[in-house]
Amino acid sequence: MTASAPLVTVIVPGRDIAAFAPAALDSLRAQTESRWRAILIDDGSTDETAAIFADAASSDPRFRMLRHEASLGLGAARNVGLSLVDTEYLGFLDGDDELAPTALARLTGTLAETGSDFAAAAYVRSRFDGERYVAGRVQPWVSAATDPARLGTTIVEHPRASANIVAWSKVSRAAFWADLRFPEGVAYEDQIVAQQMYTRARAFDVIPDAVVRWRLRADGSSITQGKAQLPVLLDYLTALRGGIRVLRDAGAHAAVTARLELILTMDVPPLQEIAGAHPDPAYAAAVSAFIAELRSLPEFADAHPDPDLVAALAW
């Protein structure tokens, strides 16, 4: 491979993110590893997202833009990008988030060193403080999944890696995705895929570097901020169930226990709070049924949420 040949493809989907897309693209331009190409996929935006993506593609040959006239959803957009990858490595960046400058260098460099199928790193939330978006600290469950560094590990050896379920905290060997695709037409499409990655990998790496600033939009408009909507809740619970099922089917019972601990600590309490005030009784019924399913799992008896973890979650 020559010095100028692309090393890694970053798939960047987005819909109606004109306010945030320039920062995402600038974070790619600022990478210390410059041998990247990015596939920008405008998923049926009604704002200026398409124009921003098109301008990037016209000014820098490392960007390529695709446009969906009507929204197909994040899973479908990522799958379209996956079909176009021809580099050794691939990663993802949602168009409203930002990469740290050393993100691609650290992740591809780790894979070159180890030969693992993928590398997963830490990330931080970026919240609006009234004037600007400010990055927080690495959350405890993310740290448990990525710190300390573990090279050439497996989900059996490192079950708490299963907490890192987002697509954009990882870089993979492109060949690893030959028969791996995202579910389409649903929210939380990356959760099941993440567990499939962990259970299918011969080996993977985790590193503690915070490689992404994950934006929590001030207006609450992102999919992951809409759990009070019943359809979003149902997709969310389906994704959680599916991830647990993947781990159980692979015999990764310690990872199932780790996921249950995290779900009981992080996911269930806020869902119960929403359910208590929700006008649709179907919402509370769905949450109750999900909790009953968790309690019925054999691994539930070993799942004990850590009180110190609960206390450390607020920031």
Image (spheres, helix red, strand yellow):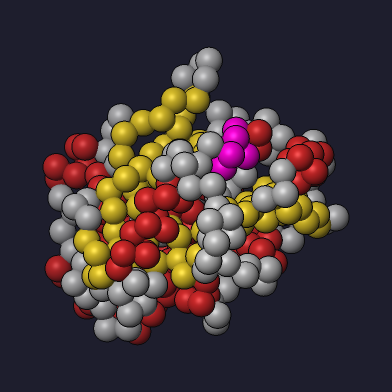
Q: Quadrant of residue 25?
A: top right
Q: Is residue 203 left or right of residue 241?
A: left
Q: Is residue 11 left or right of residue 59?
A: left
Is-magenta flag for residue 143? no
Identify which residue is drawn at 51% across, 77% down: 175
Q: Residue furthest front?
A: 2
Q: Position of residue 55 (x, y in %)?
A: 79, 39
Q: Nearer the viewer, residue 237 or 66?
A: 66
Q: Quadrant of residue 82?
A: bottom right
Picture quarter with the C terminus = top left
Establish if 127 lies above or below 229: above
Q: Is residue 104 visible?
A: yes
Q: Residue furthest top?
A: 131
Q: Position of residue 5 (x, y in %)?
A: 59, 60
Q: Which residues are magenta?
A: 23-29
Establish if 5 lies above or below 177: above
Identify which residue is drawn at 25% across, 70% down: 152
Establish if 208 lies above or below 183: above
Q: Is residue 261 left or right of residue 168?
A: left
Q: Nearer the viewer, residue 305 or 189?
A: 189
Main secondary structure along the magenta-highlighted residues: helix
Q: Is residue 273 visible?
A: no
Identify which residue is drawn at 22% across, 61% down: 150
Identify which residue is drawn at 35% across, 84% down: 249
Q: Position of residue 166 (x, y in %)?
A: 45, 56
Q: Position of residue 74 (x, y in %)?
A: 64, 58
